[in-house]
Every structure is written in C-alpha cells, then in structure tokens.
Image (cartoon, helix red, strand yellow):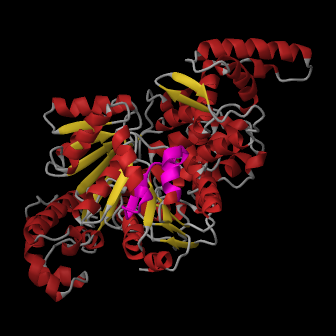
Amino acid sequence: MPIVDSVLNGRDILAILKTSGGKSLCYQLPAIHLGGTTIVISPLISLMKDQVEALDKKGISATFANSSIPAGEMRLRYEGLSKGKYTLFYISPERMKDPEFLGALIRSPVRVFAVDEAHCASQWGHNFRPAYAKVGEYLDEIEDYLQRPIQRLAFTATANSKVQEDIVRMLRLKAPEVHIQDFDRDNITYSVIPCANTNRSDDVLRLVMEHPEDCIIVYCVTVKEVEKVCHYLQDFGVQANRYHGKLPTDEKNQIQEDFLNDKIRVLVATSAFGMGVDKPNVRLVIHPQMPGSVEAYSQESGRAGRDGLPAKAILLYHPNDRSIHAYFIGVTNPNGAKIEPIKRVIGKILVNGPAPLSFKHISLQASRQQSIINSVLEGLNSSQSDIKMVDVQATVGMLVNQGELEVFEGVYTLANWQDDSDYYWIEEVRKNDWSKLSAMCNWCETNLCRRWTMLRYFDERKPIYRCGMCDNCQRESLSQLAIGPLEKTVRTSTLINLAKNLQPLVGAEGSRWLHVLLGTLSPDELTPGEQEVFGRFAWNAVSDIRRWRDMLVEREILTQDNALTEQGHLWIDGKLVIEPRSVPQITVETGRIVSIQEVEQRMKVLKAWRKATAYREDCAEIQICSEAQLKKIVVLDDVTESSLTGAGFNPSWLRKYAGGVTLAISKIPKAEDVSA
C-alpha cells in the first residue's frame, strides 16, 4: 500500500482518500510496526471513542483524552502517555494548549502526529477550526524543544487543490508525498428531485416508505428542520430519531450507539453526525435541504454504501435553498470595515474580566462611537457607522473562531486578543464561500452526469462521460430516444434560477452578464452583487444559456436588459404557469409509435424484476442487468429471445434471464397501435 510505505519510510504525507477509503489503517498499521507513540488528532469525541474501542478489541494499546474524561482519570492517562504505555493516543486539536498534556507529551516516545479530517486546518475548507490551524505551529515548538523531528501525516476525504495547498502550509508538512485516491464512489446513485419550497417532510416520508427495510440517514441544514422532520416520521410510525449539536452529550452518544447497532432505522441529523462514523449498511442518504458546498454534500452522501454495495443519495432541491446559506455566509463573515469599532467596544467590556455580551448594546455603542469619528474625520463612508446586531454576531463568531475570544455558557473572556489585527482575508473567505455555494447550486441544476461533475469539482480531470446511473444520465437516455436533436428541453427550475440570477446583473453592458454567470471574469473585477452569482452557470454550455435567456425574453418573463417583468414575478411566485410542450413520442423500428409513458412503465417493471432477481440470487442489481441494458430492452417492440439477441445480449445472459424479462414485459397491457 503506497501510503503505508511512505509512512514507514519516514515521509510527511498528505492523503486525500474518499469516504470509507481506509484512512485510519494508514496510520494505525505503521504505528504498530514502528513502535513508540502515535498521536492522532481527531475532531469528534465519538470518533475517538469508536476507534479506541475497536483497537482495544484487537489487543492494541490505545486511549483518548477529551472533555468527557474526569480529572483523576485524565492524569492517569497522561502518566501512561509519558511512559510510552500507548501505541495510539487520540486527542482533539484544542488539547495541544493543555500544559499537562504537553508536559506528558515531551516525556513520551512520540514518533508520529496523524491529523485526521485535515481540511479543518484550512480557511478554504468547509469545516474550518482555528485550533487545527495552530497544530503546525505547536509541532514546530515541540520539535525545537525535543531537538528531533516528528513525522506529520494529514488525512482528509474532501480537499480540492486550493485546500490541499493550505493544509500543507498550515500543518507545516515538510516536502510531503501527496496521495490522492480516486474520489469516485461508483456504488452510489445520485439523484436531485425538484420540490416545493415549503414543507418537505412529506417528500422525506415518501422516500423512507419506498425503502422499508433500508437503513437511512436524513441530513438537514438546521436543527429546527431536524426536529420537524423527525417528529413527522415518528408520527407515521417510522423508527426514527434525531441527532444534532444542541442535544446533551449523553443523549447524542446513546442515539449514535443505537443507530450503529440497528436499533434506529432512520436517523435525522445535522452535519454534526457522521464524521468518522463507520456504519457500512446505510443504503440511502436523503437531503431535504441543499448543503452549502459540494465538499459537505460529498462527505454526507458518502455515508451511504460504505460496504461497497449499491446505495442511493437523493437531494430534494428548490432554488430558494440558496437563501439560508446566503444568510450563514453573512453571519460568519463580518464586514471588514465594521470589525474595528465592534472590537473596540468588546475590549472595553471584557478588559476587567469575563462577562456576557449583549449584541444589541454593542451595536448601539459601536454605531454611536463610529458616528462621532466619522463626523470628525471627513471622507469616511457613513455606512460604517450603521452597525447592526448581525454585524456584531458575525464579528463575535469570527473572534471566537480565531481564538481571540473564548466563550463558556454565554460568558466571554479575552484570550489571544489582538488590538491591531489586520482582517484583510475576510473578504477572500467571503468570496470563497460564495463560490462554494454557487458550485453546489450548479451541481443541483446541471444536466450533465452528476458523478462526472462532482469528480470535476475535486480536480479529477477525467474526459466527460455518463455514469448511466444518476438521474441525469437516465433522463438523458430517455430524452435521446424521445426527442429529436433540435428539440432540446430544459427544466423549469433551471429557467427560474437563470431569471433570479440575472437580477443582480440588470443593465449590465453587452455580454458581461454572460461572463459573470460563466465565471470567466477576474474576481477582483466583480461588484458585491456580481460576487453572489459569479460562476452560477459555469457547468452549462454558452449556447444553452443564451437560448434559455432568449426564451425568457420571448415569453415576456424578462426585459431585454434582464429585469423581471410583472409576468415574470408572477411566474417565479408560482401564480403563472407556462404550458410545457406536448409529450413527445418515439418510433421503434417496426413503425409502431410508443409513448414516453410506455417506455417509463416498462423501465419501472424491469427494475422491479431486477431487484427481485438480485434479492433471490443475493447479489448486486447491476450484476443482473445494467442501466444501459435496461434501456435497450424498453425500446424493443416485441421482447423475445430473438430480439434480445439482436440487441446484443449474450447467450449466457439469455439462458439465465430472458424468460424473466419476457414474462415481466408481457404483463404490461400494450398500448393500441397507432398508424404512423
């Protein structure tokens, strides 16, 4: 195994491994072989607990240190660390600031530091944690004290090239070997289902009922949505429970244990659940709300099918899903010009000791003080004195994340407070967050293969292809059968998104609107409104975008300068329906005309036959018949052994399955022949 070889050879490494790709083995096996102690930095208490229990069962000496351990027991574990008792010792990154831990560490035979979920060290990652970003600095100081190097290993499942560079820089990896595993999870079928903007609990219930025996995770963006969906499922008798960060630790641990032991069939959770949780038999992951980035979706949907067997990831999507993430971007990335006056007020409040903070009081005080400064110093932007509570909330959150403030049970304390910090990077982070959100919306709305577009996002430069399994590939196959080359269709949701994303670009000169939507301009040239829609249609053809925009103008949804008309507002609000084209038909070789509904009915029947056959033979459905093979069958006029032979099916397959296929098709009532 190349990664293990690199570790055994003493090299620093950065390993990008897909979910279920065996990250833990890459540091556990060398730790056993090399001897000494390997420190593993992990983000979650539950993950530490699970891995230590698994190692204990194999007779490997391991333990962890976190806030759940009583002080007396913690001292015993530190003593064991200092004497080399443990092969692997798991900690959170925050533990690196504990003087008692550091004292035990420098007396221990530590050889290796393995950083799991290393993307948390990057400002550009989707789960940034400031304590992770400090790990490299702490290790340099430990090396200086010990006068010897400590090998550093970084592992993650989600990191594009920009995040990879940041991980190397922040963890201070020395000439690392970079190992990138193929991100492709070819056993997962991806689907995006357009849905209503309001209550999606009915849609979740329907999907759960369609998979009555399967283990399912339902990921929601907010705690409120988790509670709502969970209670709705329970009301209909579904064996469901919920998991989110606001639950007591003991309750979360019990729920996780029950889910892992199959006492809970459906778990409704926020992103707080799942990182490092190894449950192999999850067959379906449902997202009632769109996540804020492709990285987050890849990681969460990757909880499905970790045993390598077929699984599904279904996302319920509405264009307005973007709004909640736009709000999150606003409250996590403060306005750079307002940070200084807010910090000035906070510093005065906390200089005399810990205290709770009133965001309303701070906003009023900061606004008043800044107004006085603005009246004295001419030329300052007056908007800087209009400091709202949301500005204070965003600034306080940023200061906590940066380690300048600490908070415990609502009481704040000055920590690594910096009076003169320059927050120039805030705007770059904001742009990066908007870019990630746009990429996620693009993925939901693309007509290309979902698997290929996800791989492309993670810099896997594979030639464009179709997986044959995702909703787009299956829809494209039917569309190619049903629609002539000049009669291309487009989803209503795509047109609505185009109309909405053109609103910040009303009056743009020439084709600037097109360049903004395609993401071909330099980010430095963009206005704030353009930043929010930059690159939103980067995965669409230029000709398609122009054609769709012209269609909206022709239908009097947009004006020539891209502004919404009165009719356009009614259409977006759902008060006006634009009639779709008539349902197309396809002509098979015999001349009989088959409606697209008949093709879909045949496909449904054949999939049911395939599922039953796979269950009977205890194998994967794709081993019985691939999607491409099913699509060949559904367009045959008379499904016989002879016609199947002509369609390219081999004799071995025909002997096993031709009888079942012909029997399944024969039970479908034939539509009346229509003369051509």
Seen in the picture, residue 559 relative to 619 is either above or below; the reply is: above
Q: Residue at 68% across / 50% down in the picture? A: 514
Image coordinates for residue 575, horizontal then vertical, percent: 44, 26
> Left or right: where does residue 669 sit relative to residue 360?
left
Q: Is residue 378 magenta?
A: no
Front one among 325 and 120: 120
Q: Where is residue 159 in the image (x, y as percent from the top left)?
A: 53, 59
Q: Is 294 displayed left or right of 671 in the figure?
A: right
Which residue occupies the foreground of this view, 106 or 176?
Answer: 106
Q: Name the image quarter holding residue 459.
A: bottom right
Quadrant where the C terminus sits is bottom left
Magenta stretch encompasses residue 91:
yes
Identify which residue, 672 or 158, lies in the foreground. 158
Give the vertical position of 38 relative to 210 (above or below): below
**In the picture provided, is 653 more to the left or to the right than 590?**
left
Query: Can residue 399 be seen from the camera position used here?
Result: yes
Query: Residue 592: x percent and y percent?
Result: 24, 67
Please state the extent of the stretch shown in magenta in the rendering.
81-106
The residue at the point 62 percent across, 39 percent down is: 402
